[in-house]
Amino acid sequence: MIIAVDGPAASGKGTIAKALARHYGLPHMDTGLLYRAVALNLLQWHGDPESEFAAARACDFSQVDFDDPELKTEAVGGIASRISAYPLVRQALVERQRAFAAQEGGAVLDGRDIGTVIAPEAEAKLFVTAAPEVRARRRFDELVRMGRPAHYEDVLADIRARDDRDSHRAAAPLVQAEDAVRIDTSDMDAEAAIAAAIEAVEERVR
């Protein structure tokens, strides 16, 4: 069984996807980390985020530690959102994601184009969203817990800018798949959101 979980930044899709993977005993991939890894490579290699070719060259995961806390910083996230619009970058990462989805037994993937591009054949598709202000507060709180300097208004502006870039890019924009179940987590805690997601998956696969 393939479960596709899409949605904008800080909507709760990662928390939901991990919980679904545990619940169904499936491997999980946070596809956003791939783009963040490319962005971190660019930063560390002093590459130009405005150059599609520089970004494509940074699609090298041989030295990447996916547990590196730098991957979660706002600077890396902002660059990841920009370079994810480059067709050369998307081409380099798409096959890796499709191979993960196609493994025997299935998988859970979360991102922005899983149900529309990476695994349109997924048995269950969720589109997880929340109000920008709620998502900004979550991201702000996360940064504070990590000891990172953060200002709520700056985080909110960044969330809105990412939403605009992700929704209007030419290559695989963030859109809800026609057959996806929409889950708005604005007024949900993690436990309620996970319960809603499991219920939605059960409805699709029963």
Image (tube, grey):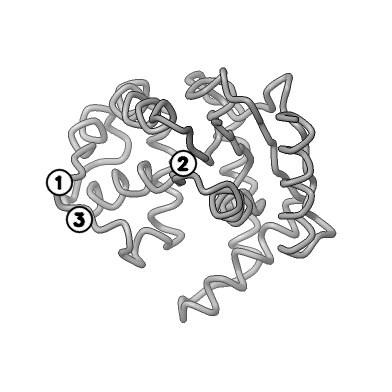
Tell me the distance, in whole angstroms, between the alpha carbons under discs 1 and 3.
Answer: 14 Å
State which tag comes first along the sequence, 1 or 2: 1
Q: Which of marks 1 and 3 is nearer the N terminus?
A: 3
* Separation (CA) of disc 2 from disc 3: 17 Å
In the image, residue 184 sits, relative to residue 178, either above or below, namely below
What is the residue that sits farthest to the right in this orientation?
A: 187
Crowd rating for badge 1 (residues with CA inside 10 Å; few <14, some 14–19, many 20+): few
The residue labelled by disc 1 is 62
Q: Nearer the viewer, residue 166 or 17?
A: 17
Q: Which mark is residue 158?
A: none
Front one among 63 and 77 = 63
Point 28% across, 52% down: residue? 40
Residue 199 placed where, x, y %? 78, 44
Residue 9 rendering spot, x and y as whole percentages: 59, 49
The residue at the point 32 percent across, 47 percent down is: 39
**Residue 133 image-quadrant placement:** bottom right
Which mark sits nearer the N-terminus, 2 or 3?
Answer: 3
> As drawn, is 184 to the left or to the right of 8?
right
Question: Would residue 46 be found to the left or right of residue 37 on screen?
Answer: left
Q: Judging from the image, what secondary structure is the residue with disc 3 in?
A: helix
Q: State yes or no: discs 1 and 2 in contact (Cβ < 8 Å).
A: no
Dot 2 crowding, Cα within 10 Å, few <14, some 14–19, many 20+? many
Q: What SS does tag 2 mark?
A: helix
Kind of residue indicated by mark 1? Ser
The crowd level at tag 3 (other Cα within 10 Å; few <14, some 14-19, many 20+) is few
Helix, strand or loop at label 1? It is loop
Tell me, for residue 44, which label it has, or none: 3
Amino acid identity at mark 3 = Gln
At label 2, the amino acid type is Ser
Q: Name the residue under label 2.
A: 81
State which quarter of the image contains the C terminus: top right
Q: Give me the residue at 56% from left, 43% from top.
A: 162
